[in-house]
Image (tube, rainbow, N blue to C red):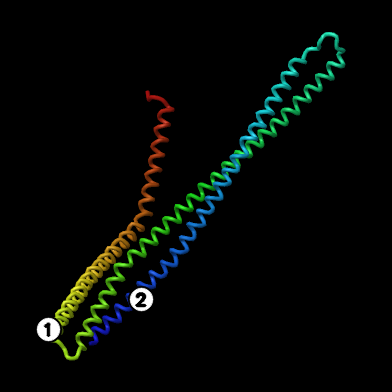
Amino acid sequence: MPYLAQETTRLQTALQAVAAQQAALTTQLTTQQQAVTAAQAQRTNAQSGVTQAQARVAPLQAAAAAADAKVAEAQQDLLDGSEPPQGIPPATWRARLAALRKQLALAQTAATAAHAKVTEAQQGVAQAQAQVQAADRQIAAATAAVQATQAAIAAFQPRRQELQSALSEIERMNVEITRDPMARATLQQVAAQLSARTGTLEESLLVTRFELEDAEALLASSITRRNELTTLLANLATQIPEAEAQAAAAQEALAAAEAEVTTLLQDGPLG
């Protein structure tokens, strides 16, 4: 029967389209899952970097604390030697004082360098932690993409099953129609099913026609409204220069009135 042949072709085409879409989504899903794995590996490496960077901070902080202690010691030595002791020649005392000052300067330079290394190490920790956070965001985004694709694939499955079921039903009808010898009761059942299917298609076609008519009516109404608005805008465009001229004249009149009031105020009360 031409109808069954046409339905078979239509359903097969729809089924192939669904299968193609599912295949494309499956390929996309594989790529997205690989992206999740890569982001997780990056996160592991970044976390190792955080651990290594944090391990460098403590020794550097200890070295900075030791350098600060040397600075404090040098400052105390300089403070203790700021006054010349009894029985030491002034030249010797000045030389010793210069040596203490130099020692303090060297200690301060060493302490500054030690603290700079601590700051650099702490910045390294912050950068490594930022890389971990970036990797976490990548994992979250990639995981969300995987879940969305999995949901899309799952959403196609009911439609695929529906199409496959319809194809199987048509094949069964064809088998019953071409069966030899033909069973009258079975043919009557097939005819009823074909009639019901035809009725469903005719009802769907009728609904589609009504929707098309409503859409056409809405489009015609929208076009009419658009034309009305275009005309109104054109009229407003011609009225704008006149309104602007009136506004300018009113502004000039107001300025003249303000000037007159100012003159009267300056002249004072009459009489």
Q: Which residue lies furthest to the bottom in this view?
A: 181
> Which residue does the image show at 52% across and 47% down from the upper left?
132
The correct choice, above or below, for 41 with respect to 79 in the image is: below
Residue under pointer 2: 16
Measure the C-alpha gap from mark 1 to mark 2: 34 Å
The amino acid type, in three-letter code, at marker 1 is: Ala
**Towards the viewer: 171 or 244:** 171
**Residue 142, picture quadrant:** bottom left
> Which residue does the image show at 25% across and 66% down from the upper left?
218
Residue 201: percent from left, percent from top: 21, 76
Q: Answer few, some or many: residues within 10 Å of disc 2's Cα (few below 14, many 20 plus, some between 14 and 19).
A: some
Horizontal placement of 70 versus 194: left or right? right
Query: Where is the C terminus found, in terms of image quarters?
Result: top left
Q: Is mark 1 on a helix, strand or loop?
A: helix
**Towards the viewer: 200 or 34:** 34
Q: Residue 185 carries which label?
A: 1
Residue 261: percent from left, percent from top: 39, 32
Q: Is mark 2 on a helix, strand or loop?
A: helix
The correct choice, above or below, for 70 with respect to 12 in the image is: above
The amino acid type, in three-letter code, at marker 2 is: Gln
**Which of pointers 1 and 2 indicates the residue nearer the eye?**
1
> Which residue does the image show at 34% across and 61% down from the upper left?
234
